[in-house]
Image (tube, rainbow, N blue to C red):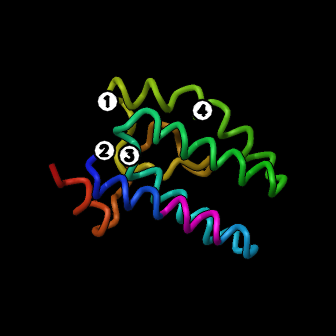
Amino acid sequence: MTPRLRAHFERELTLALEAEARGARAEAWRCLERAHVLSQAHALPHLRVHGRMFGVAWRGRDTRELLGQLPRLLLAAPGSVLGRAPRGNTGGADVGIFTPMPIPEDLQALLREP
């Protein structure tokens, strides 16, 4: 990750933690989805986001999301290393594991940087 991309990635994770602490689970999840999009090409950050998603699902007692995160935890790092992570996918159980999705414009600019 470039330093700028890493900074934005870390910012989204921090915002997610802060939102969850306030009880704003939907906002926390949106931040994790954005972090996921930023991390997809990088194995360890990608895995880290899925770990955070699993944690939010666990604390929220969201069985569907917990079960959906299990295969993602197994596939995240290999998918990144092999270039198989679908661009723009937000990483939650509400979308297919291999489904590409549109990338928000502000994130596209970060991902285009060398």
Horizontally, residue 49 falls left or right of residue 64, namely left
User: Residue lying furthest left in this view?
Assistant: 114
Determine whether label 4 and label 3 are within 8 Å by CB: no
Front tag of 4 and 3: 4
Q: Position of residue 27 (x, y in %)?
A: 61, 72
Residue 29, compared with residue 23, is above or below; it is: above
Which residue is located at x 17 percent, y 54 percent? 113
Which residue is located at x 63 percent, y 48 percent? 52
The residues tagged by marks 4 and 2 sit, at their Cα atoms, a distance apart of 20 Å
The residues tagged by marks 1 and 2 sit, at their Cα atoms, a distance apart of 15 Å
Q: Which residue is mark 2?
A: 1
Q: Which residues are magenta?
A: 12-18
Amino acid type shown at disc 4: Leu
Please tell me which of labels 1 and 2 falls first in the chain: 2
Please tell me which of labels 4 and 1 falls first in the chain: 4
Circle number at residue 73: 4
**Is residue 41 highlighted in magenta?**
no
